Amino acid sequence: MARSENMNHVAQKTNRKVRPAAPAQPGHGHGVKLGLVIATLVLGLLIVLSLFKKPADRPSAEPPVVAAGPRAIPVRERRQSPTANGAQAVGTPAVARSGRVVPDASPVAVAPADSAAARQLIGQMAQVNLSSGGVTPAQAKQFSEGFRQLASEGAAAVPAIGEFLEKNQDLGFGEGGAKLAGVSSLRAGLLEALRQIGGPEALAVSRQVLQTTADPLEIALLGRQMEEAAPGQYRQEVVDAARQTLTDIAAGKVEVKEVAPLFQVLQTYGDAAVVEDVVKSMPQWNYYAAMTLAGLPSGEGIPALIQLTKASAAAGKSDSIFPMQMLAQVGAQYPEAAAALAELARQNQIPDRAWRRIADGLGGDQYQFARQLPDNTFAAENGPGLKTYHIVSGNQNFFSTPLSNVGSAADAAQRLALVDQLLAANPTPAAVEALKQVRGRLAGRMPGG
């Protein structure tokens, strides 16, 4: 939010001696009076003109900071969006925030009948006072009912929603308020209303928002909506938005606290083309990057994860431990990940303190992002064995659940084979202790175990 600037105008007094008025000269009395009258009129005219001075001529002042009120969302330079076949869409030119003109790649849609009621409703929700410290149950009900009403109006509500989203303003509900209202903010609720409305008009607004927003959660929500509306057609646009935003944040061009949704977008909708971006992000977000590389849909990130892990292990760096754990976590799914771990074990490049973490990856805690895409769900807060983690560096937040909650008997058998392979490769005391314990857990999940 912009900082306010208080401009205090201080009147300055002059300490000048006032001389006695000189006697009026004969013949000049009327002239003096006339001059005083004219001077008075001119001074009054100047005062009146200053009151009606154009706003553009006045010194610009930033809007005041309002506690718990509307906040500005981060934005990025609008980019040209390719169509599904790679050609530029032809549409009405739109002026970007950077001042340059770009083609409007939004789907061509007939403008629906505008809804004054929707515009009024959004205005009322935007003015809700949250200065008391959060959303109350009554306010949460008000927001939920407002979003439901907007969705029920259908395409008629889309222009009003688009107008508000174009302002790049938001009203955050806070953690408690998000649970009560079902969404994290006013904009998130409006995006969900667009998703429920559907149709070409809603999709057009979503694509326009995607072109400029640098809010990671919004990009994830828009990606989900656009993928549902047209599977695969706009996936590259969503991925490109996430890549550009992540690059801008890393370069300090955009200030965002939580970047996890961007990594989740890359992991869910990306392919081999995003690997380089993820690898570049490793110094700032090492946990997020390793989880993303391990979780790309078809294993496109596994070679890069192996290479990074081997390089760090050879240099004796401690930052190789979590990537080793991620290789163990996906080792049953990707044989090359299992082979890389076994090779590191044979070369005695796995430190003793890493074996407990590797054992967790094989049969214990399985690491995941807090928000699961594309369904946009969270893990149950009170789920059995659920653990949450916060890494101060990069503000990285994620959770883990026991393997028993996410694995299968066939998966357990593959993990058992990897445990035996590692035991044979490196029978050090630390490795044997950690691997035998996890072997017992995995064997218990087998038929007859």
Image (spheres, rainbow, N blue to C red):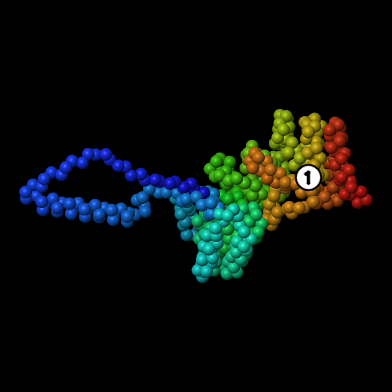
Residue flagged by tag 1: what amino acid is it?
Answer: Asp
User: For the view shown, which residue lies furthest in the right direction?
Assistant: 448
Q: For the point 62% across and 53% down, which residue is it?
A: 174
Task: Answer whether residue 84 is visible to the viewer in this image.
Answer: no
Q: Name the foreground residue: 241 vs 14.
A: 14
Q: Using residue 76 as the reference point, say whether residue 137 is left or right of it.
A: right
Image x and y of residue 286, in percent: 67, 39
Does 13 appear above or below 38? above
Q: Residues within 10 Å of mark 1 (few under 14, many from 20)?
A: many
Residue at image point 45% right, 49% down: 62
Whether residue 431 sits left or right of residue 305 in the image: it is right
Compared to residue 185, the image places residue 109 above or below, namely below
Taking the spot 21% from the left edge, 41% from the top edge, the residue there is: 18
Residue 125 vs residue 320, the one in the foreground: 125
List the residue tagged with mark 1.
365
Instruction: Identify the image quadrant of residue 294.
Output: top right
Expressed as whole percent of the image width and height from the top left, the position of residue 417 reads 86, 42
